[in-house]
Amino acid sequence: MSLPAPPRSRVLAQAAFETRLLLSNGEQLLVSVVLPALALAALALTSVPDLGAGRRVDLATAGALTLAVVSTAFTGQAIATGFDRRSGVLRLLGTTPLGRGGLLAGRSVAVLVVLGVQVVVLGGLGAALGWRPGAAGLALALVTLVLGSACFVSLALLLAGTVRAEAVLALANLVWVVLLGLGVLVPTAVLPEAVGTPAALLPSGALGDAVRGTLVDGSWPWREWGVLSVWLAGGAAAVARWFRWEG
């Protein structure tokens, strides 16, 4: 009788499967790569909307990277997990040696791998348009993107694990559209105060402002990291409490 593979091997195998699934899905590629690339080109080559102080291509690239995180870590994961939950895939995988924790870990690793592909693609496009980030700022931005991904994955799982799949599809896409103007592509500082102040406390605003701050000014976004950490902790606690594997 053969023994199951070690936990690390099971997680990596699941992550590889999830990564192939994400990269082979045309709709996922559209949302995670094509739309952020189009947003980057449009923002960098036009003069509207106002992106605040700094080189426009730098601000546009930061916004596109933020959009990539929201698209993959939140919208894509929420929809995929919601329909896997409805079809019973989550319940079945949770009873295998992989386990529920291994399944979630594998999905999280897959998101980071896809994020790496997005950074390369969008970074290359930004460089072609004139983006020249400093090494220190780029390192800080990568830390921010990973933290933001973890935050949005937790929120995606919360949505997917508590709402019916059809509602998840509608809500995830609606949230994606709304967040575009709440710090993802446009800095919260240039929004009207009544909108910008609360937007800066949302994960979208915190992530967008943090990525822009690191890539444009090379600054340490302590405040934004704090906001993202609070949302991550709250989202993870809510998932642990209310996530349903069937439904």
Image (spheres, rainbow, N blue to C red):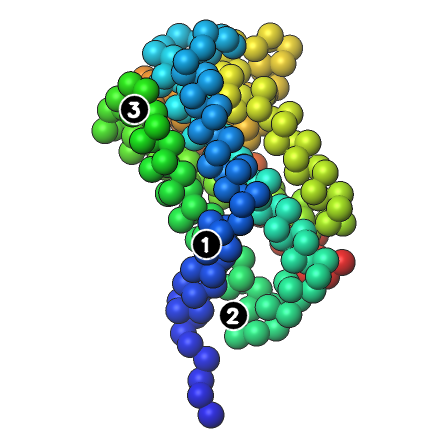
Q: Give the residue at x 29% y 25%.
A: 127
Q: Amino acid at mark 3?
A: Ala
Could you give the CA–CA distance between mark 1 and mark 3, rounded to whole angstroms? 27 Å
Q: Position of residue 218 (x, y in %)?
A: 30, 21
Res. 60 visible in picture: yes
Check disc 2 and report the residue beneath it.
98
Judged left or right of residue 239, residue 102 is left
Q: Residue furthest bottom?
A: 1
Q: Residues within 10 Å of mark 3 (few under 14, many from 20)?
A: few
Residue 124 falls in image quadrant: top left
Report the number of discs.
3
Identify the mark nearer the N-term, 2 or 3.
Answer: 2
Check disc 3 and report the residue beneath it.
128
Looking at the rendered image, the disc whose residue lies closer to the viewer, 2 or 3, is 3
At numbered mark 1, what does the secondary structure look like: helix, strand or loop? helix
Q: Amino acid at mark 2?
A: Leu
In the picture, the disc for residue 19 is 1
In the picture, the disc for residue 230 is none
Residue 62 falls in image quadrant: top left
Judged left or right of residue 76, residue 47 is left
